[in-house]
Amino acid sequence: MSFIEEFQANIEALPNHLRRKYALLRDLDKSLQGVQTQNEQCCDKEIEDMIQRIKAGNVTPDSSLIKFSDDALDEQKHAIRIADEKVALASQAYDLVDAHIQQLDQYLKKFDEDLRRERDTAVVTGAPATTVENNVKSGRSGEGKGGRKKTRLATAAAATATAATPSGMDLDLPVDPNEPTYCFCNQVSYGEMVACDNPNCKIEWFHYGCVGLKEQPKGKWFCADCAGTQKKRKGK
């Protein structure tokens, strides 16, 4: 079984794994809301009782008796435990997706090394190398230059996770610090991206939204910086 077949087999199970974790998150969230509501009502009642006792002169404002009951404190601890379980589940979901992304990044890195080795061999022997565009880079995929759209393959797992996430649930998970950044916005790869056709472009890859694109451009495409450089050269 090739890597890509193995990867596809593994990623097919990812949505179901994530769906189960998100279902657990929903259940925990519902349980937490119930505990918090009950605890707030209990605390409000105890505060009102304390105020009445102070007004009646049964206790003084600085008395050590002015505190929440053990039941109220236990409910607060219970709410914290549920919140901790939610954080653990969210971290597990992130790790699942991240593992698939790292697996794909490793394959793309190996693929890029194989391509370079094949080109080097072709140069030495004079044999024709397999026709593959030079803009295939580790962590990215391409359809060739000429301004055609590029979509980073490593986001496939993240996209699958997004599709499996129930609507209305927003998990603020950390971004992998090792993830490379692109575009003028200096953000990680996501969604549809386009490569600048200037081989010396310092940035190379750009998000559609950041460069005002809604669909793949026809013919060659240059970023704003490289387009300006091209015009200056033509003017000389």
Image (cartoon, rainbow, N blue to C red):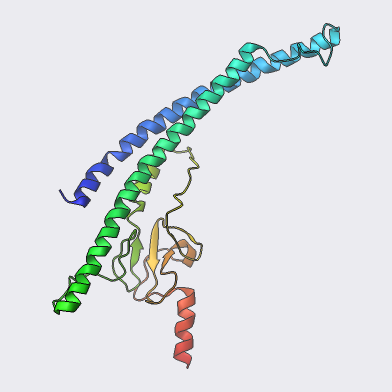
Location of residue 94 in the rendering, given as x and y in whole percent from the top left corner = 41, 41
> On the image, which quarter does residue 230 sit in?
bottom left
Of residues 44 and 70, the one drawn nearer to the viewer in this rendering: 70
Location of residue 189 in the rendering, given as x and y in whole percent from the top left corner = 41, 57
> On the image, which quarter does residue 214 sit in?
bottom left
Residue 160 vertical position relative to residue 77 in the rendered view, above or below: below
Residue 48 vertical position relative to residue 232 in the rendered view, above or below: above
For image coordinates 34% across by 49% down, the residue present is: 101
For image coordinates 19% across by 49% down, the residue present is: 5
Mark count? 0
For image coordinates 71% across by 13% down, the residue present is: 46
For image coordinates 31% across by 69% down, the residue present is: 135
State left or right for residue 71 relative to residue 203: right
Of residues 121 and 108, the one drawn nearer to the viewer in this rendering: 121
Residue 170 vertical position relative to residue 198 in the rendered view, above or below: above
State left or right for residue 156 relative to residue 26: left
Of residues 111 and 44, the one drawn nearer to the viewer in this rendering: 111
Residue at the extreme front of the image, as rendered: 124
Say if residue 163 shows up in the picture: no
Location of residue 235 in the rendering, given as x and y in whole percent from the top left corner = 48, 91
Residue 4 vertical position relative to residue 17 in the rendered view, above or below: below
Say if residue 201 shows up in the picture: yes
State left or right for residue 227 relative to residue 163: right
Location of residue 45 in the rendering, given as x and y in whole percent from the top left corner = 70, 14
